Each structure stands twice: as C-alpha cells, then as structure tokens.
Image (cartoon, coloured by chain):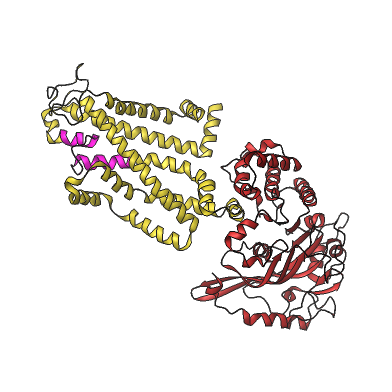
Amino acid sequence: MLKIVRDLFRYNREFAVGAILATLVLAMAVLSAFSPYAPNQIYVVPPDAPPSWAYPFGTSSRGQDVFWQLTFALRNTLLFGFAVAILSRILSLVIGLVAGYRGGMTDRILMSINDTFIVIPLFPLLVLFYFVMRDGMNWVLLALVIACLGWAYDARLIRSVMMSLKTREFTRTSVFSGMRMHEIVVQEHLPYVLPIVFSTTLNNINWSIGLEVTLSVLGFTDINTPTVGTMIFWANQHSAMVAGIWWWLAFPTAFITLTFIALFLLAVSMNEYIDPRSRLARMGQGAG
Amino acid sequence: MGEPKAAGNGAPAEEPVLSVRNLRAYYQMRYFGIDREVRAVDDITLHVDRDEIYGIAGESSCGKSSFIKTVAAANRPPLNVVDGSVRFSFLDRDIFKLGEEELSQVRWKHLSYIMQGSMNVLNPVRRVRSSFVDFAFRHIGKPERAFFDEVARHLERLHLAPAVLDAYPHELSGGMRQRVTIALATICRPEFIIADEPTTALDVVVQKGVLTMIREVQQELGSSILFVTHDLTVHANIADRLGIMYAGRLVEEAPTREIFANPLHPYTAHLIQSLPRIGDLSQKRALPGAPPNLADPPPGCRFHPRCPLAMPICRRETPALSTLAPRHRVACFAASPAVAPSTEVGEAARPARPAPSLEARQ
C-alpha cells in the first residue's frame, strides 16, 4: 500500500499535485484543534484588519480571525463531505450489489427507486427542505439528506458491474460450492467493485461539498456552524466586497477551490491507477 | 481403460454411482403471452459406474451442458426439470428432492463440478488461496493448518508448487490455472465429478497433460467422472464409455473402443468418420443440414432430416434407445430391426407434463 502511494507520487503528476494540495487542506483543518478562539466567538479581534503578521489572513467585520475561522470551516466542510460520501457509499453499495446480484423483480424495484432519485432535481428539493426545517437544520441532518440523494448514480454503476460479475464462472462455481448470497457478494464480488467505489467516492465528496457550499452561500443551511460556505455567506452579509474586506472572501474561496482541485486530481489519478491499460501505458512511458 | 465391470447392460454388479432415468428438462419461456418450450434434454436414461469416466459427446447446442447442469441440480429457470429422476449412490433420494441446504452440503464434497470455460473459475481479484478457502474449507471441516497441509499435498499430486496459493490467477499460465481448477474440484475427494469442457481453451500439448492428470486423480480417488466435450479425440483419450447426444437425446452409447470401432448410429458414424486420421487423404464430407431447432423438433427420429439412411418409419416414430450388443445401446431403426419405437414411453410421459409452466418454474 505504502509502495503504491510512493510509486504513484513519483510517476503520476496528477496524484503528486493532488496529494500535496490535499495535505495542505487537511493540515489547515487539523490546525483547528489549536485555535485560540472558539468557532462561534465574535469580536475577539479588532475587525476589518488586513492580512498582517499578527493576522495572516486578516480579520473579518465580525471580529474573527479569518485564518482560525477558516480552519474550523475547512474541518466542518471536509467532515461533511466524508460523512456524505460514507453514508451514500453504504447505500449505493448495498443497493447496487443486491440489485445486480439478485436481478429479476428485486432489481426492477430497486432500480425504479434508483431512477426516481436520479431524475429528482436536487437543488430545489434541498431548498424546500431548508424551508421546512428552518431552525431545526444542522449539518448532520443536511449530510443525511444529501447522502440519501447522492447514492443513485453509483448504485447504478455498481449494479452494472455486478451484473457482469454474476455471469462469470467463478460466481457459478461459488454458488455450486455452497456459498450463500452474502458470502459470495462480500467475499467474491466486493473486492472487484471496491476500486470503482473508491474512485467515485472522491467525486462524491467533491459533489457534496459543492452542494453544501452553494446552499450555505445562499443561507439555506445552519449559518451558525462555520463552514466555507457560511463564511462566504457572512462575508456577503457584511458586503465584504463593497467594503474592500477582500481577504474575508478571497481565502475561503481559494481554499475551497484548492480542495476541489485536490479531490479532482486524486480521483483522476485513482481512475488511471485502477485502469490497468493506462497503467501499462504509464509504465511504458516511464521506461522510455 | 476400465475393463467391463458390469456384464451386459442388465443388472450391474454393483450399484452405479449415478443413474439417470427418463430425464427431461426443458427451457420454458413465455414471451408476449406465447409459451415456448425448448426440449434441451429429452428422455435421457443412463448410468455411470463407480470408477468410470463417462464421456458425453455431441455438437454445440445438442443439450450437453443443459443435461449435466440438470444432473447436478444446478439448472436455473427457465431450464426446468419436467420429468425423470437423477439418483446418486451417496444420496438417499432423488437429487431434485433435496432442499437447498442439503444440496449445498452435498455439492463440492461429494459431487463437484469443473465448469465450462474453467479458465475463469478463479476470481481474478483474489489469490488462489482465498478461492480454496471459499470453496472447500467448509466442506473439509478441518482446522486451518490441517486444511492447508491437505491443500499443499493435493497440489503436489497435481504437480503444482504450493507457491501458486499466493498467486493471483492472472499470474498463472492457462495450463496451471486449469490444474488449479482441477485441484479445487477434487480437493474434497468427491465421489462424482462433472467436467464441462475442461480442456476446450487449451492447446493440444497442455490438453494432453491435463487429461492425464484428470485420469490420475480419478484413479487415485476412485471417483467417477461425467466428462462432456464436443471433441471426440479428447473422449478417445479419456472416456471409458461414450454417449453420443443429438438434439437433446442420447442416440448411442457404448464403451469407447467399441463405439469408435463399430458405430451403429449413422450420426455417430459421421462424427467418427469426420476425424482426421494419419495417412487418410480422402475428402471429408460434411453432413448436410443443421441440428434441428429444439423448440420445434421434427417428428419421429430427430436425426431423420439429415440421415442418409432415413426410412419412412423414422419420420413417424421415435426410436427407443435399445441394447443391441452387450453394453452397446443405440436409438436407430436402421441399425437393427430390434430397435423398437419409443412412442409409448414418450406419449405416456406427455400427459404428465402439461402442468402450467408457471408452476414448473417454482
């Protein structure tokens, strides 16, 4: 495993850049543990101070240190992305594996639910959800809802892989040798499906963070939890652009963009790593 | 070769390991409200003795694979057993009467299966070791250490280094993979092995090695094998007795030497004639026509549209598989006047069948 990471780092430029950026963002998130201020405290530092040695990213109009605020924001945003990804992965794996393996009626029922989720327009639904929940809204709830909406594409992908695996000889042999359905699916098929799931997970994190930021910027989430989106929301509320407090907007935007790029590059390099053909091409390139 | 163990075809000296009686298995489908029935296995009766390799030959789509799937009770809808029984000596009842749980206890341990295209029996993303654990561990019922000792001994028997256990299937050559699958199928010392074209994808040299190996293992374990391939030369090498299938029916059955020396059914004769022989420069003639559509087989003998010896009776009546010489059965009116029409058997079985196909599907 370590060797794979090292080789990827050495020979795959996308992976190298992606890994460095991801480490940077993660390091920021980890720094939140050392923050001298609590995340929701306001007016703890002089407001509207431009970046300086004392306040590397400046301070906001609400009297918060943008650097430390951003560490909390990145932590929450990343946690949100991971939570959504894990939850939706569980859903899509279970549904995709069962639908693909069982086939027939089970498949038809699960896939009609699946297709319903694919065609539902997400954004209006989430906005509606916010207006229903109002003060009851928090990021756990939002993560749950987005996870419930984000499994459908991957469930279909996993199902299609499963349908092909189901017809292979080793599946028939497993059935013949007396293995049960859950044993066959988990022991024989899951290892085959996991790399694909791993690659789509990174995309799914990206997607869910994107949704969360969009909703937060517009104020359709719990605005008191600092996330990158809510930071931008508060900056807009205080007309940071008009007031010339550019650092309040620029740093969150820069870091969330870096996060997107990092995850995207990692997903691309994972795809290449998983696809043996492009791996071979890369090996040829390395030798030449 | 297995010398005659049972004199004649009547009562064998000991109970056969497998006896199949009047087995019929049809693909029953319903498309757009129209019931369609493909008679892939039609009225097959045969037995396989202990320590015997029984070969089944026939061209593609003659029902070979459907037959052995049914024998192992591994048939899935739409292939349904319509009639007949399959009994193994190690089972106290008909295999179709066993529950799913009992079946999975019996399979692999007593009855194992080398699948068609067995190059792909191994899971490409798991090491060979895991395949052994997945398929055989539960059946052997020994602690892990003893289990792997036994696996290693067994691999050695098949001239495989124990190191293959740590390899992924793609790291092995085709012949090695084939040997691993044979090792997997025989690790539990099953009484009965079904081999579905186990050598088809291999070149002739590897094929010969694999066949020798199957023979060796079979002799050592004393198991019986039902060996299916369309390749008659393979059968000539390995089978003790040979059954020829045509369009879902068994048309001839005899000890291998006998059938090659003295084929009685015109279809068998054609098959054997088509084999190249060293020194024989004569033009090989193809049999005109194609095997019948099993959804709508011709009346009477299913071979008659292509048969050079067809007589009027062949168009009306189905010949019964009749014993003409000791251990030699044939279903052809032209072979001997002693061959009787089997209509009464066929028609007698008919009325039992029209059970609605939905019911049979369960």
Outermost residue to the top: A53
| Residue B287 visible to an observer of this rendering | no
The percent position of residue A217, horizontal first and vertical second, equals 20, 39
Residue B131, position as x, y percentages in the image: 61, 45
Q: Is residue B180 left or right of residue A288?
A: right
Predominant secondary structure in magenta?
A: helix
A77 and B335: which is toward the camera:
A77
Specify whether residue B260 is painted magenta: no
Could you say which is closer to the camera, residue B190 or residue B306? Answer: B190
| Residue drawn 72% across the image and 51% down it | B189
Image quarter of residue A21: top left
Q: Which residues are magenta?
A: A206-235
Choose between B98 and B248: the one closer to the eye.
B98
**Which quadrant would residue B157 be assigned to in this image?**
top right
A243 to the left or right of B355: left
Q: Quadrant of residue A257?
A: top left
Does residue A282 appear to the left or right of B338 in the view shown? left
Q: Quadrant of the C terminus of chain A?
A: top right
Q: Is residue A72 above or below residue A138?
A: above
Instruction: Tell me: residue B350, above or below residue B249.
Output: below
Please give left or right for residue A136 compared with residue B67 in the image. left
Residue A165, given in percent of the width and then of the height, sits at: 53, 51
Residue B111 appears in the picture as rendered: yes
Look at the image and give the colour of chain A.
yellow
Q: Residue at x 62, y 67 (%)?
A: B97
| Chain B shade | red
Q: Position of residue A242 (x, y in %)?
A: 11, 31
Q: Residue at x 65, y 57 (%)?
A: B106
